[in-house]
């Protein structure tokens, strides 16, 4: 049995590979039908992970939105929405952010060792803060999540977290939604940054599915031999 959760990385980007623009105003990369698909994927997971930058910049709720899906989770003996997880090197997160304030569910903060004491002082009333090494070791993070009973983890960004998970070869399945426009601004954040990725011209990722959803397209890639595990 694997000692880490099944990891599904989910991302929306522009045709030219950007996650957002550089204006400070959130760029919507998807449509209502795809947002509902993402909600359904969330409802099937045990935990949702985003980077600290996403918590600061986007202030996400990271909740299952559909009442029917929340009720179905409860009927299966689960909490209405998955555990929330973030990763931080500095620990300087706002305890009143929606990540912490919303949802009757556990919140986990994986923090670099030097910032641990400050992070626990700041966030200890709203989350469990876990020492994760220096720098944060994602293998240590996913092993700890496994030990806490997380069998299926959804990673939702941002670009730094995408890059770290992918270059560490910790992703089993990639959902990549392409929006029908360009951003065209190198100041904007990209899907991934520089790194040594396991999938190269001599080791091509496996395209497992392609689906048009309104004006966007979903590409599903199998990135490990665990692809499709429930």
Image (spheres, rainbow, N blue to C red):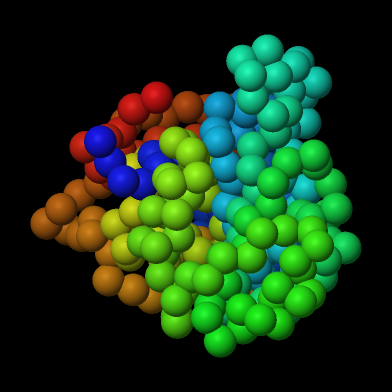
Q: Nearer the viewer, residue 22 or 181?
A: 22
Quadrant assignment for the C terminus: top left
Rendered residue at 41%/30% (across/down): 210
- From the viewer's perspective, tell me whether residue 88 is left or right of residue 4: right
The answer to whether any part of residue 24 appears in the image is no
- From the viewer's perspective, tell me whether residue 30 is left or right of residue 113: right
Q: Position of residue 74 (x, y in %)?
A: 70, 19
Up-down relation of residue 212 to residue 83 (above or below): above
Asked where in the image residue 41 lies, by quadrant, the reply is: top right
Q: Position of residue 81 (x, y in %)?
A: 70, 33
Give the total of numbered labels.
0
Q: Position of residue 112 (x, y in %)?
A: 53, 78
Rendered residue at 59%/46% (across/down): 48
Rendered residue at 27%/71% (across/down): 196
Q: Nearer the viewer, residue 224 or 74?
A: 74
Up-down relation of residue 65 to residue 18 (above or below): above
Up-down relation of residue 169 to residue 196 (above or below): above
């Amino acid at each position: 049995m694997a000692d880490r959760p099944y990891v599904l990385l989910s991302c929306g980007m522009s045709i030219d590979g950007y996650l957002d623009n550089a204006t400070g105003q959130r760029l919507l990369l998807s449509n209502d039908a795809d947002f509902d698909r993402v909600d359904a994927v969330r409802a099937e997971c045990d935990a949702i992970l985003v980077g600290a930058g996403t918590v600061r910049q986007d202030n996400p709720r990271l909740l299952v939105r559909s009442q029917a899906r929340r009720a179905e989770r409860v009927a299966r003996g689960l909490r209405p929405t998955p555990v929330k997880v973030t990763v931080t090197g500095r620990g300087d997160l706002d305890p009143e952010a929606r990540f912490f304030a919303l949802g009757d569910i556990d919140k986990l903060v994986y923090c670099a060792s030097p910032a641990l004491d400050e992070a626990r002082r700041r966030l200890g009333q709203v989350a469990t803060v876990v020492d994760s090494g220096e720098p944060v070791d994602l293998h240590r993070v996913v092993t700890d999540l496994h030990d806490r009973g997380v069998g299926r983890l959804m990673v939702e960004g941002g670009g730094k977290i995408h890059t770290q998970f992918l270059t560490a070869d910790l992703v089993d399945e990639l959902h990549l939604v392409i929006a029908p426009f360009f951003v065209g601004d190198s100041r904007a954040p990209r899907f991934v940054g520089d790194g040594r990725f396991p999938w190269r011209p001599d080791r091509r990722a496996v395209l497992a599915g392609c689906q048009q959803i309104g004006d966007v397209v979903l590409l599903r890639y199998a990135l490990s031999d665990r692809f499709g595990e429930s």
